[in-house]
Image (cartoon, grey):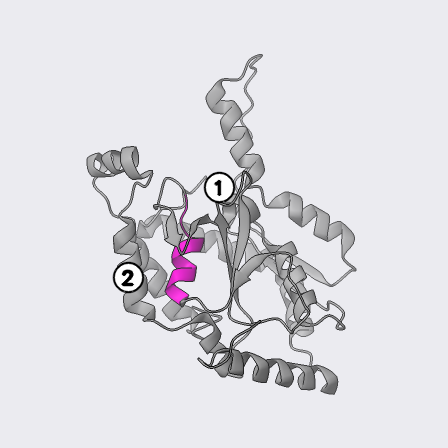
Amino acid sequence: MLGLFHMPLDECEELYRKLGSDVFSQNVIVGTVKMSWSHAFYDSQTWENILKDRMGSSLMIETARNPTCPKVAAVSTIVNRGITPKAFVFRNYGHFPGINSHYLGGCQYKMWEAIRASSAAPGYFAEYALGNDLHQDGGLLLNNPSALAMHECKCLWPDVPLECIVSLGTGRYESDVRNNVTYTSLKTKLSNVINSATDTEEVHVMLDGLLPPDTYFRFNPVMCENIPLDESRNEKLNQLQLEGLKYIERNEEKMKKLAKILSQEKTTLQKINDWIKLKTDMYEGLPFFSKL
């Protein structure tokens, strides 16, 4: 909504609340039955229809024709290529010839397909078949995609030093309750594996230690309760919003420092490189252009 459609924040919030109530509505009995045969509690087709209706058939790369549109990527997880899952990057940009990303992906996909594939969270929505690949939520592999973003930046601008990276978390809940147990159940063991695989803070700790001062900024409020992904009640969303506002107030100086860094003018060389890259991406979006 922000990167590709340049929607004002108020409209983003309004649409988020509207989509949440539309998508995350399900009869418990129906949802439980659906879970047994599609591993999805909610109606994935409803979600697809909403995306198609909102976005039409536009391709990711077509947004590159707008010179004010930033480089945007959405990450999914391919689960049927070999034994180990693999990250897949839906891009609205291409890489220069000879530049290869470590990650699978492409820019000739529809925007609604990118969101559908990258939001196919197991248990919530059915996996998404695109070509010969089965896609699930990118959070299964890269719940914190900051390192991937840095790699993609290096591919796009190989000779430009990293000036600033901003990592926005969705909030974290840390319980103080301790159990004096001497044996953990299978459910607990599996839960620990899942929590470890989808952890976001380890990547944060690593980047915070490796990157120079005033280069890396992470914002991730601590929440007073564990809010599930499919929460759509207004009172709970208002609670999240209030916690976010309090967090911003506590980190006002950090926000001001970040705003100052982000608002710095680009150098002439950077502007020239950006112009060349824009023209390359614009041609890549045309039907007669194909990448060898």
Q: Position of residue 168 (x, y in %)?
A: 56, 57
**Disc ID at residue 51:** none
Please identify the quadrant where the N terminus is shown: bottom left
Question: Residue drawn at (34%, 71%), measured in percent from left and top?
Answer: 57
Please identify the quadrant where the C terminus is shown: bottom right
Q: Is mark 1 on a helix, strand or loop?
A: loop
Magenta part of the chain: 111-121
Question: Residue drawn at (76%, 73%), measured in percent from left and top?
Answer: 159
Residue of label 1: 224
Q: How far is mark 1 from mark 2, CA to CA?
A: 32 Å
Q: What residue type is labelled 1?
A: Cys
> Counting other residues with Cα less than 10 Å from the Cα at mark 2, is it few (<14), some (14-19), or many (20 or more)?
some
Question: Residue drawn at (38%, 52%), measured in percent from left and top?
Answer: 129
Q: In this view, does 279 lie above or below 160?
A: below
Q: Which amino acid does label 2 sit on?
A: Ile
Main secondary structure found in the magenta portion: helix
Residue of label 2: 50
Left or right of residue 268: residue 113: left
Q: Where is residue 195 in the image (x, y as percent from the top left)?
A: 54, 35
Question: Residue drawn at (53%, 24%), measured in percent from left and top?
Answer: 189
